[in-house]
Amino acid sequence: MDFYTVVLRPSREYWVALCLENGIVGQGDTQEQAITKLREAVQSFQEVYVSQADVYCNPISIKELHEFLTVESKEPVSENYEFRAVYA
């Protein structure tokens, strides 16, 4: 695959990036840092996935996406999310 679909959302003190194709998550102080961490995690996962036959890899479900986008907080939650194609 040439790229992954990534959803970015702010969390209290950092940004979180979720890969929809495999459920891997990265976080960082900025959007770009979260994407960099996600890219590193995806690359590490791919190495393991290729070398071991018993590693599970599936796209996330709608329920999992909803859980990711739903942030429980006493303060109002930003509903600004960003989708990106990230090349890995």
Image: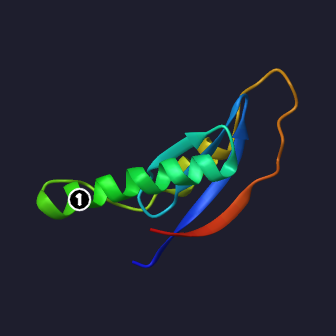
**Quarter the C terminus occupies:** bottom left
Q: Nearer the viewer, residue 48 or 79?
A: 48
Residue 53 seen in render: no
Extreme top residue here? Answer: 74
Q: Nearer the viewer, residue 32 or 60?
A: 32
Residue 77 lies in quadrant: top right
Q: Is residue 37 above or below residue 57?
A: above
The image shows a total of numbered marks equal to 1
| Residue 76 x %, y % | 88, 31
Label 1 Cα crowd, 10 Å radius (few <14 / some 14-19 / many 20+): few
Residue at 60% across, 39% down? 28
Q: Name the residue type under label 1.
A: Glu
**Quarter the N terminus occupies:** bottom left
Residue 82 lies in quadrant: bottom right
Q: Is residue 2 above or below residue 40?
A: below
Residue at 64% across, 53% down? 32
Residue 84 seen in render: yes
**In this rendering, position of residue 38 left or right of residue 11:** left
| Residue 21 x %, y % | 45, 64
The residue that mark 1 highlights is 47
* Scheme of colours in the image: rainbow
| Residue 71 x %, y % | 70, 34
**In this rendering, position of residue 23 left or right of residue 73:** left
**In this rendering, position of residue 26 left or right of residue 11:** left
> SS for tag 1?
helix
